Amino acid sequence: EFMSEIKGLSVLEKQIKERLQVGNVIIVPGNSDKYEWVKQEMGKACIAFLKTIVKPESTIAVTGGTSMAAIADVMTPLNKKNSYLFVPARGGIGEKVENQANTIAAEMAKKAKGDYRLLYVPDPLSDSAYESIIEEPSINEILKQIKGSSIILHGIGDAITMAERRKTPESIIEILKTNKAVSEAFGYYFNAEGNVVHKVKTIGIHLEDLGSIEHVITVAGGKSKGQAIASYFKHGKSNLLITDEAAAEQILRDY
Ligand code: BG6
């Protein structure tokens, strides 16, 4: 029975690869909307994969969110000899402390026996604050390290769920609704066709930086995220999607 389950998931992985046009897909059993441990299973799959790609000089950027926090929960040393640098992919973007990229990068580094650098910036930033903050030497230095990442781990959220979680002003939520935003990643909000309909202005990795990052790893699961995942993959760059069975089935059924 165990083998047939494994076989079943590999069929699903192949179907999702084709449907979303993504190079590599890993699916874990279950539905992470219902059970927290399913996120940890995605986390373990992510760490096993990381071990196959890290190089001695790797810098690993991470976004915030509960899926990323679950990876941090189960993080282990990636390699006996080397230590890696963990950095947040972007500034704040309004999450609770435990779900912030800074917190997660520090926790991953501690458990992986690596180093970390943090980025403290308010968000969203006004245009003028943005222009002056990126000139600050301390910010500029960490920004270079972030932009030089060879691996990025990121989540995908349902647009309105994320906007509310970030205490986004009602006027912006209205814009998201009018423009039919369905997904969010890195502070960008996308519609069902995968077009950007709104972005949170903050510093760090932007969508256009993903092209030069060797490994973009997306971790998102749960039946409720099927549409959001499908939307992100319309244009979003990713080399690997780690998801769960419930999200995969939802995508194949409806998107
Ligand atoms: C955020 C990321 O912090 O987590 C987002 O910056 C992502 O890009 C979100 O959409 C996903 O959160 P969760 O809790 O559903 O993993």
Image (cartoon, rainbow, N blue to C red):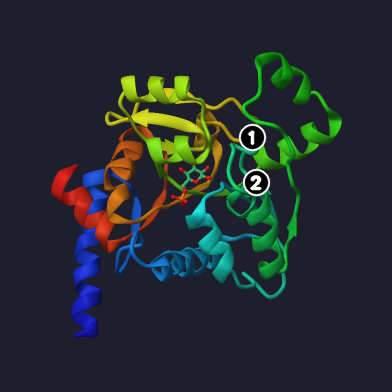
The residue under the point 51% across, 34% down is 187
Frontmost residue, 252 versus 38: 38
Measured as percent of width and height from the top left, residue 227 is found at: 27, 42
* Residue 121 to residue 214: above or below: above
Q: Which of the pair 158/14 is nearer the observer? A: 158
SS state under label 1: loop
- Residue drawn 70% across the image and 21% down it: 130
Tell me the quarter of the image containing the N terminus: bottom left
Height in image: 140 above or below 112? Answer: above
Residue at the top extreme, as displayed: 128
**In-image side of 118 versus 58 (left or right):** right
Residue shown at the point (36%, 38%) measured from the top left: 232
Decide: is 143 above or below 84. Answer: above
Whichever of labels 2 and 1 marks the residue nearer the N terminus, that label is 2
In the image, residue 80 sits, relative to residue 235, either above or below, namely below
Camera-side residue of 30 and 140: 30
The residues bearing labels 2 and 1 have C-alpha atoms spaced at a distance of 8 Å
Q: Where does label 1 land, which residue?
A: 204
Which amino acid, mark 1? Gly
Q: Secondary structure at mark 2?
A: strand
What residue is disc 2 on? 88
Farthest residue toward the right?
137
Asked whether the viewer can see residue 250, the reply is yes
Residue at 32 percent of width and 47 percent of height = 22
Nearest the viewer among 23 and 219 is: 219
Instruction: Name the side, left or right, on which 159 lies relative to 95.
Output: left
The image shows residue 65 at horizontal and vertical percentages of 52, 50
Q: Amino acid at mark 2?
A: Pro
Q: Are marks 2 and 1 in contact (CB under 8 Å)?
A: yes
Q: Residue furthest left?
A: 253
Q: Is residue 56 visible?
A: no
Q: Position of residue 201 (x, y in %)?
A: 59, 25
